[in-house]
Image (tube, grey):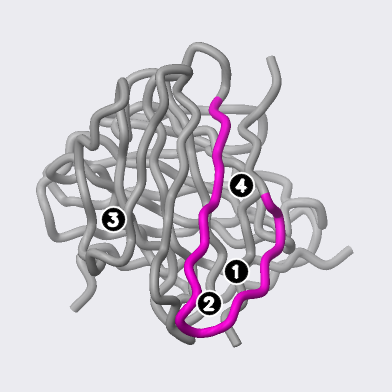
Amino acid sequence: KNEVEQSPQNLTAQEGEFITINCSYSVGISALHWLQQHPGGGIVSLFMLSSGKKKHGRLIATINIQEKHSSLHITASHPRDSAVYICAVYNTDKLIFGTGTRLQVFP
Amino acid sequence: KAGVTQTPRYLIKTRGQQVTLSCSPISGHRSVSWYQQTPGQGLQFLFEYFSETQRNKGNFPGRFSGRQFSNSRSEMNVSTLELGDSALYLCASSLQGTSFEQYFGPGTRLTVT
């Protein structure tokens, strides 16, 4: 079993829909990152959080340390949100990555 | 501020050869981490350098090595290349380490034939 599990693996949505991507982990962590990777490979860090909730524009990330679970929400999704979203946890001085969620948003 | 840069962007090598990849972090960032991304294994941590010292290493064979210079620029080297080393190699810089916000470079796509 992977130490970091993401669901769903693939997600399609219509423009304007509310999106939720989940991340569960089985190891102790001190921080969790949400990353976005567009076709071509470039990775952008969306959030880094260790507790609670963070919001940036249409993106919201939450984490529940007790339940070892984090969610990334996208409100009013747009075709430019189409990308792979990757959860990564900081454990014993290194990042462990989930396998990613491929999101496609259609107009 | 200029972002993280990686050179070269694309590279084709033959089995048995060695390769050196370069990463220039954002100015002021002292931590550089390297990652390998393949379709089968996803993203995996290679190693992290901070102030010219390797601070942490992932589960990769000794053929994978790296170093960091006094200006925080970093290089990684892969010796005796194998077909399985074909991957996208990404570096990321941060102020203090991997528990801090990471800024990724565009990656170097290595193909081993």
Q: Are marks 1 and 2 in contact (CB under 8 Å)?
A: yes
Which kind of residue does numbered mark 4 sit on? Ile
The residue under label 3 is A96
Left or right: residue A72 compared with residue A53: right
Mark 1 vs mark 3: tell me if same chain: no
> Which residue corresponds to the image point at 18% horizontal and 51% vertical from the top-left?
A68
Tell me how far mark 1 sits from mark 3, CA to CA.
Answer: 22 Å
Task: Tell me which chain the residue with mark 3 is part of.
Answer: A
Q: Do the residues labelled 3 and 2 touch (CB within 8 Å)?
A: no
Which kind of residue does numbered mark 1 sit on? Leu
Q: Nearer the viewer, mark 1 or mark 3?
A: 1
- Secondary element under disc 1, as helix, strand or loop, is strand
Graded by Cα atoms within 10 Å as few (under 14), some (14 to 19) or many (20 or more), the crowding at tag 1 reads some
Which kind of residue does numbered mark 3 sit on? Ile
Q: Where is residue A79 in the image (x, y as percent from the top left)?
A: 82, 57
Q: Position of residue B36 (x, y in %)?
A: 44, 62
Above or below, comparing residue B15 to residue A85 in the picture: below
Segment colored magenta: B8-25
> Which residue corresponds to the image point at 60% horizontal and 42% vertical from the top-left?
B105
Tell me how far mark 1 sits from mark 4, CA to CA.
Answer: 33 Å
> Which residue corresponds to the image point at 80% horizontal and 58% vertical from the top-left?
A15
Instruction: Tell which of B92 and A96 is nearer to you.
Output: B92
Mark 1 vs mark 4: tell me if same chain: no
Mark 1 vs mark 2: tell me if same chain: yes
Mark 2 vs mark 4: tell me if same chain: no
The residue under label 4 is A74
Task: Tell me which chain the residue with mark 2 is part of.
Answer: B
Left or right: residue B35 compared with residue B24: left
Q: Position of residue B1 (x, y in %)?
A: 69, 14
Asked whether B18 falls inside the magenta stretch, the response is yes
Which disc, if any, is residue B110? 1
